[in-house]
Amino acid sequence: MKQVFAEYPFPSWIFACADELRTRASRWICTRWVRAFLRFHRCKVGRNFVADGIPLIRMQRPGALSIGDAVTINTRPKSNMAGIMQRSIFQCIGTGRIRLEDGCGLSGVVLSARKEIRIGKRASVGVNTRIYDHDFHSLDPKHRTDRKIDNSNVRSESVEIGDDVLIGANVIILKGVKIGEGTVVGAGSVVTAGEYPPRTIIAGNPARVVQTAES
């Protein structure tokens, strides 16, 4: 049977050029907009910062979000073809802080902090990953009947992602997690409270160590 291929009215290189122009325009405009927004809110922004698309940023106090040198935040769907499903979101509640160290990259992520979330140097956070250092609500149903009481009884514990960590797509990382440097987190994993050693591979729901540095 003869194979039939879809044909475009223009050569493929025209579409490639158009995509490249859109990418450059997005990065030029969005980087400047995000940098200006963060500086207005007294947040540190390092050199060679790049934003492709406009993330959603919410803070309850100035300076809660800190960005190191050469950090890349992708939000526009075509900025990462692994399948970004929503805007990158950075939420700092109360005295919560988010620190993005030098050289890290994030795509379509959600980071919500009541204490602190730290993403280490050169760490890569995969598309649609969610990192929460708190439960959002009290675990006691009696507390949840009153919004103020509920909010004051939320459990929270800092999250630390080490240097050179690679996090796959669609990962959920919960409060109290500490991931050692050079560790790989498998796509779709749910990483619950605990410390994970450096240079290992962790995966699953709940995540566990599936390969150690000596393996």
Image: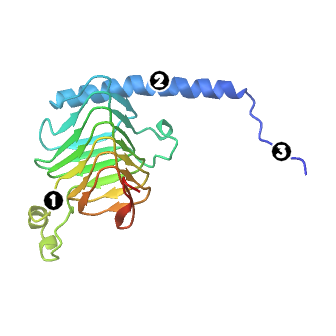
Q: Mark 1 points at which residue?
A: 156
Above or below, 111 relative to 138: above
Depth check, mark 3 against mark 1: the one in front is: 1
According to the picture, the residue beneath numbered tag 3 turns out to be: 4
Disc 3 and disc 1 in contact, CB within 8 angstroms: no
Near mark 2 (Cα within 10 A), the count class, few <14, some 14-19 or many ≥20, is few
Locate residue 39, reporting x and y percent.
Answer: 20, 27
Foreground label between 1 and 2: 1
Q: Which residue is drawn at 47% across and 36% down?
A: 79
Q: Which quadrant: the C terminus?
A: bottom left
Q: Which label's residue is closer to the chain start, 2 or 3? A: 3
**Residue 65: mark in rendering:** none
| Residue drawn at (36%, 31%) of the image | 51
Which residue is the site of mark 2?
A: 24
201 shown above or below 92: below
Alpha carbon of mark 3 to alpha carbon of mark 1: how far? Answer: 57 Å
Query: Which amino acid, by three-letter code, is at mark 2?
Result: Arg
Q: Which residue lies furthest to the right in this view?
A: 1
Report how far apart the C-alphas of labels 2 and 3 lie in the structure: 34 Å
Residue drawn at the location 15% of the way across and 73% of the way down: 145
Distance in Å between CA atoms under marks 1 and 2: 39 Å
User: Residue 73 location in percent, x, y?
Assistant: 36, 36
Label 1 amino acid? Ser
Q: Which of marks 1 and 2 is nearer the N terminus?
A: 2
Residue 160 coordinates in the image, percent (x, y) = 22, 49
SS type, badge 3: loop
Secondary structure under the numbered disc 2 in the rendered image: helix
Asked which secondary structure carries label 1, the reply is loop
